[in-house]
Amino acid sequence: MTADGPAFRLLPRLEPDNEFFWTSGADGRLRFLRCADCGHYCHPPYPRCPVCLSAHMAPEPVSGRATLVAHTVNVHGWIPGSEPYIIGLVAIAEQESVRLTTNLVGVEPGDVRTGMELEVVFEQADDVWLPLFRPVGGAS
Amino acid sequence: MSPEEPLERRAAITGIGQSAIGRRLGRSELDLTIDACLAAVADAGLTRDDIDGLATYPGMGVGTPGFAGPTTPEVQDALRLSLDWHDGGGEGPGQMRALIAACLAVGAGLARHVLVYRTVTESTAQGDGGRQGIGGAGGGSGGVPRFSGFLQWTLPFGAVSAVNWLAQVADRRVHEFGLTREQLGQIAINGRRNAARNPAAVYRDPMDLDDYLAARMISTPLCLFDCDAPADGSTAFVVSHRDYAADAPRPACHVHAVGTALRGRPSWDQFDDMTTMAARDAAASMWERTELTPADVDVAQLYDGFSILAMVWLEALGFCGRGESGPYVADGSAIALDGVLPLNTAGGQLSGGRLHGFGLIHEACVQLRGEGGDRQVVRPGGRTPEVAAVANGGGPIAGSLLLTRGAG
């Protein structure tokens, strides 16, 4: 059985620019900063839109759907006590250039296919909601 | 000299030096650095009084213990150098940014003989505790730290080491190009074969494909032998104005073109093309600065901190087509000492030891000077290599370099 992630979650430091992202999962929705003028989703979050330089940036919910760009099964014991876990790189459905490094859950390594469709699920750790991804339609 | 000539062409590597290299030498970083620096200065036919510039990568306070080596102020003071120019830093076109900065300083007339060094003591620093992930040390007194900057996006998911990030580059290549472990293994096997001919290499025992495939997995599809070995060692160069080249006791290695571009997003996970990343941009910018082509290159020293990076560089530099590095290396012959493109002739970092880019530059000079001994490349017709390509870095970090024997 593959683990949902490392035995111990190192966590982000919540700061004014990233707090919305790391707490977004409290209501089950994934959010990214989006430009009100040109529609570009900006990740990581910056004060201005990197495409049109507008300052009209605000968090906006997305569908939570994503495509698997690449993945790896970590075996080495970087974090003591960990079983092998799957690290994935996903591109969100709304904008291919927005990626998240994440863990794949509800799927065994042999069933993971780069290019597969995924959906977000959240794991709460302290005051942070980590966006993880599983195959669309739930566990295989 | 035409005004369009690339400025770096005014520079030449006139001296090279290395300290002892090995696992857990237990010597200080300054001790190793001085050995390498004095060797390079003597090799250039100079004394320390001639040195008027000093540069290193990555400079002050960077990375985990044993990673950064001594700062330029420490080395300046230890050798009591009188400098007209100095530079240490980690942001730029890979580890070779220090060498490139030195070339530009020489070209701009800020210095005439720049001593450039890179020192690692990661093997001693890591001791028996094994290799740590980036940020993976956690702990520290006062509880578990939290993370900002790029690491906040990877550490929570256990993507704690560059091997995790680059395993995904390899996976993407499996997906897009059909890369196999048998192909990838040829980078490690080629390095080990060459290391057997290099007395200074860290790992010299024979390794074949069965050994490679049986190695324990680290982060799929990368196994232990896809990862370089932490080592202790210092490498140093003297970068001089080319008008000194004829007076130098050893053949000068002229800097012909440097590759410094970063045109995609500077990120391990947001870069547009995960199969190439910054190597694509650095290599493209290098070829934009020269009439030479990949077919002119006699020997290649391409960054192999992880085996997959050498594959990426083979394509980025145009030695084979995009996605074709797997078939290119598949039977090992193309990259062997007598192949069309001898690769990582001292063993690379995988078997030679992780001298973090500078070992590859050093070996390029050794080959151009014809000093490779048992591993010396001899080109068709009995020719000593005249053009060497060097690449440093991986992911969003990349720099490349063409060196030539004789001005060109």
Image (cartoon, coloured by chain):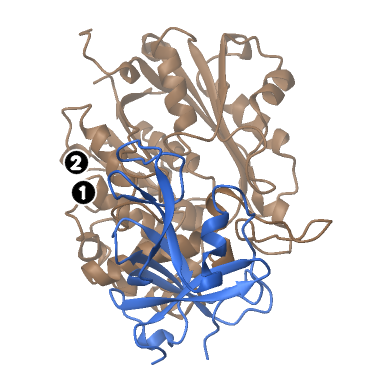
Chain colours: A blue, B brown
Task: Please give the name of the residue rendered at 49% of the width and 42% of the height, measured from the top-left corner.
Answer: B359
User: What chain letter is assigned to the residue under label 2?
Assistant: B
Establish if B178 lies above or below B359. Answer: below
User: What chain letter is assigned to the residue under label 1?
Assistant: B
Q: Are marks 1 and 2 in contact (CB under 8 Å)?
A: yes
| Residue A2 coordinates in the image, percent (x, y) | 52, 86
Marks 1/2: CA–CA distance: 6 Å
| Residue A97 coordinates in the image, percent (x, y) | 31, 55
Establish if B323 lies above or below B83. Answer: below
Residue B38 vs residue B301, the one in the foreground: B301
**Left or right for B114, reference B308:** right
Q: Which image quadrant: the C terminus of chain B?
A: top left
Q: Earlier in the sequence, mark 1 or mark 2?
A: 2
The residue wearing badge 2 is B294
The residue wearing badge 1 is B319
Task: Please give the name of the residue rendered at 61% of the width and 66% of the height, measured from the top-left corner.
Answer: A128
Instruction: Work out whether disc 1 and disc 2 sit on a shared chain.
Output: yes
Q: Dot 1 surroundings within 10 Å: few (below 14), some, or many (20 or more)?
A: some
| Residue B150 coordinates in the image, percent (x, y) | 52, 51
Q: Dot 2 surroundings within 10 Å: few (below 14), some, or many (20 or more)?
A: some
Task: Please give the name of the residue rendered at 37% of the width and 55% of the height, measured from the top-left corner.
Answer: B309
Could you say which quadrant of the image residue B79 lies in?
Answer: top right
Any part of residue A53 in sight: yes
Residue A84 vs residue A76, the one in the foreground: A84
Q: Which image quadrant: the N terminus of chain B?
A: top left
**Left or right for B291, reference B73:** left
Q: Secondary structure at mark 2?
A: helix
Q: Secondary structure at mark 1?
A: loop
| Amino acid type indicated by mark 1 | Phe
Task: Please give the name of the residue rendered at 45% of the width and 78% of the height, measured from the top-left corner.
Answer: A104
| Amino acid type indicated by mark 2 | Pro
